[in-house]
Image (spheres, coloured by chain):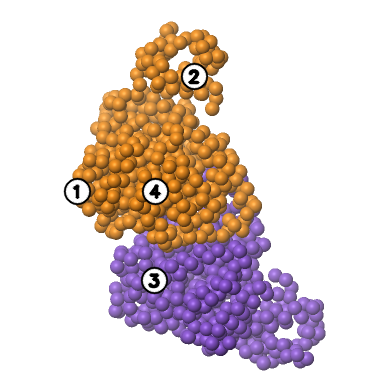
Chain colours: A orange, B purple
Amino acid sequence: MKLYEQFSTEIKDSIEHGYYQPGQKLPSMRDMSAIRGVSISTVQEAYRLLEDTGIVMSKPKSGYYVQQIQNINLLPDISRPEQQPVEVVYWDEVLKLTTTDNTSNFIALGSGAPNTSFKTLKSFHRIYADIARNQPQRVYENSKGKGLKQLREQIVRLMQTSGCYSHPDDIVITSGCQEALSLSLKAVTKPGDIVAIDSPSFYGSMQAIQSNNLKVIEIPTHPETGISLSALEMALDQWPIKAIQLVPNANNPLGYLMPEDKKKKLLEMASRYNFVVIEDDIWADLAFQKPRPSTIKSFDTEGRVLMCSSFSKTVAPGLRVGWVAAGGYVKLLTHLKFITTLGSATLPQMAIAEFLEQGLYEKHTRHAKQHYQRGRDIMINWVHRYFPEGTKISYPQGGLCLWVEMPEAIDSFELNKNLQAYKIGIAPGALFSANGKYKNCLRLNYSDVPNEKIEAAVKIVGDQAKKLLKII
Amino acid sequence: MKLYEQFSTEIKDSIEHGYYQPGQKLPSMRDMSAIRGVSISTVQEAYRLLEDTGIVMSKPKSGYYVQQIQNINLLPDISRPEQQPVEVVYWDEVLKLTTTDNTSNFIALGSGAPNTSFKTLKSFHRIYADIARNQPQRVYENSKGKGLKQLREQIVRLMQTSGCYSHPDDIVITSGCQEALSLSLKAVTKPGDIVAIDSPSFYGSMQAIQSNNLKVIEIPTHPETGISLSALEMALDQWPIKAIQLVPNANNPLGYLMPEDKKKKLLEMASRYNFVVIEDDIWADLAFQKPRPSTIKSFDTEGRVLMCSSFSKTVAPGLRVGWVAAGGYVKLLTHLKFITTLGSATLPQMAIAEFLEQGLYEKHTRHAKQHYQRGRDIMINWVHRYFPEGTKISYPQGGLCLWVEMPEAIDSFELNKNLQAYKIGIAPGALFSANGKYKNCLRLNYSDVPNEKIEAAVKIVGDQAKKLLKII
């Protein structure tokens, strides 16, 4: 991180801790330079960055003033999905989103992919190429059974950072988190069963639910604390729910962290109502808080939680390396993994194990999180600036996606269609519902280093949204 | 191939074409050297190799004599599985077989893995390492939808060598053939359906059948021509069979090639009885004949065949790259692939595409086949020599495994258990049946370059088998 970036973070911290109050004028550049012992140009760049991220505003010939802090009223409302089991639709739209060719000048604002051009990924790249060059025979061999042992050992160590103590034999390596979720669902349900999910929810796991001939009940979800436990309890009283599948940490698409006491309460309910928790932890190592948030799994004493994750968001999606910490279902998971894909590619497993073992993974995710946090602030500011009045925005505590709720009259499928001409894509909100809620919502990716081209794209999205409202 | 190996192949061809008759004495080394214009030492080494492979025998102070040709009576009998739908068992034993640690001096005669130490694989290794080093950004990206386009194009070209004309959009890349088979089964069946299979049959696809809650009916199979069509027809008249899953080319475990007219007849029956054919073609590029055998798919005009394959036997299993040529089911397969694993690892796909594009794949498989054919002959000879009297042996037309039928009193599970002390493993025959046939059979791998250590291991297997018969 450059000096001015670091300095702007310090000022931001001061604002958040109340040292500078909303509406208050910041010290002049000259004064600030003297107070903090940095050059005037550093202060100038830091102030400009704070302005870009909407934290301060400049008044011409007066100076920089602290903005009102991100207001709770700007957050999306708590979701109110239909409280009965439904079937999942929208496969064609999911396919379109995930197969968009973003190579040729296309700006894929709807993508869920991480930034893979950070300098801290160079060490991974070196390891990857070195193993490919030096260990062909190991690379050619299948990684057997539960997957590469060296990697399972490193994953166990990594999971300890969320207070979760597992054994390498409880881990099954999968081809990404998608296989982890898909096998977990298969392990704990039979066709026709009902599964509860957070709502909005990740479209990939909903498609897996649909393909396993399951029904889903979408649980109302608060944009800051996650699913409503009272709504879940009402659903449990009414329906024979087999499992709940959710993303409690740095949620996709809302970005919240489910509070720890809520995690514990959910687990108590799981025990009382005898259902299984499928916990998607894929984003949690990109949560901005330190230390990273705990998992539901870390409170699990009954082997009732299947925790799914992968390195697709933290390292790179093209590696297809994920895992399940399978609790009481590990034997069944091992069988299902064998049947489904036999094993995952060996080289990516070896490379990630080495990346973890050398401590380079932590270094990389630390760096990525700093960028994403800044990207979030700037993207929020752009959406504020360019989207129609009345637009509400999530305030992600991690990850790399923003959830945007536009005025109800806007259909984001139509918006996305109109954006094709501009070579811009968004993720329409309805994909995050089993059957058609959130049509006025969309998900935006802020993983790219912010630049003018992206700002221009966000402005076009906003303009096109206004056009649909017929206000421009 | 060395000169003496090439020369021994020529002599073998002469024998097979009747130029030298069984029982006939071969020309003396000196005469042969003069006739064919090679050195005496080359003749000597070639004769010794022919002796090792059981094609000729030496009589002291007389010379080398042509052995009786491999006799049909030595082949295993046509299989007679129970003619009713059953459930698949034996998962624990399959797991044991496939997770055996064969790193530490263990001789894994039961393995289905290819030889990955051939010199012709060095070019693949170079490509693999080069791409890893030079194209990190592409490698980090997910290969979307149906998989890497460049690879799908090369696969279409490869499939033309079996007379099969497909379009890249009909191909879905999978994580090995196991995923191809598993998704295909899922695409065409519902829980409770009945699937017909060849018998003995590959344990991996049987486990997939079991896990999809399907029942199987095992069709009697001739060791030289594959499934009995009349038995299949009787089964079709009696049961509502949804699909047949079989390995018609270089069959695992029997090694036969299903004749072309039988392939066509099977397809006619599929049309008449309206069932789907899941064709496992994974071994066919290792069929010893030139050109390689046709696929059932190549005669398919109704989109009724889902052809599954992978590069796990021809290049390396640890890459986990396979595919389905999905016929009329391509949309459904694309969906199932997304749900199950989202995509396969990108680097292995890129490397195999390049390996194919440069024409290096054909060069490599040609080389591998020569070795395997020789390995087969030598392994057959060893089994003849060391196994109990009455043992029958398949005569594989491709691939790298032998099927051995021992006297009925021998239980190959017990045999395998007794072999643990010697650090030798076999694949027990019962794994190749849904529910317990072939207990006196086993599968042996001949992919390693034959050496004294392997011969000693085969002798131990034979001795232990005899011990179970209480004849030593």
Sequence-wise, the earlier of marks 1 and 2 is 2
Residue occupying the point 43% across, 19% down: A14
Quadrant of residue B447 within the rendered picture: bottom right
Q: CA distance from mark 2 to mark 3?
A: 67 Å
Q: CA distance from mark 3 to mark 4?
A: 29 Å
Residue occupying the point 39% across, 48% down: A307
User: Which marked residue is nearer to the observer: mark 1 or mark 2?
Assistant: 1
Quadrant of residue B33 within the rendered picture: bottom right
Q: Which residue matches tag 3? A: B89
Residue occupying the point 53% across, 80% down: B404
Q: Nearer the viewer, residue A330 or B187?
A: A330
Q: Residues within 10 Å of mark 4 (few under 14, many from 20)?
A: many
Q: Is residue A121 above or below residue B119?
A: above
Callout 4, which amino acid? Met
Please, which residue is most extreme toward the left here?
A: A238
Element assignment for label 3: loop
Give the image location of residue B148, x and y in percent. 49, 51
Q: Are dots 3 and 4 in contact, CB under 8 Å?
A: no
Q: Which residue matches tag 1? A: A237
Q: Which residue matches tag 4? A: A307
Element assignment for label 4: strand
Give the image location of residue A77, x and y in percent. 26, 32
Q: In the rendered view, does B16 fall on the left or right side of A247? A: right
Residue occupying the point 33% across, 71% down: B215
Q: Is residue B238 above or below residue A457?
A: below
Q: CA distance from mark 4 to mark 2?
A: 40 Å
Element assignment for label 1: helix
Please, which residue is most extreme toward the top here?
A: A61
Give the image location of residue A322, x and y in percent. 46, 49
Q: In the rendered view, does B64 fall on the left or right side of B17? A: right
Q: CA distance from mark 1 to mark 2?
A: 54 Å
Callout 2, which amino acid? Ala
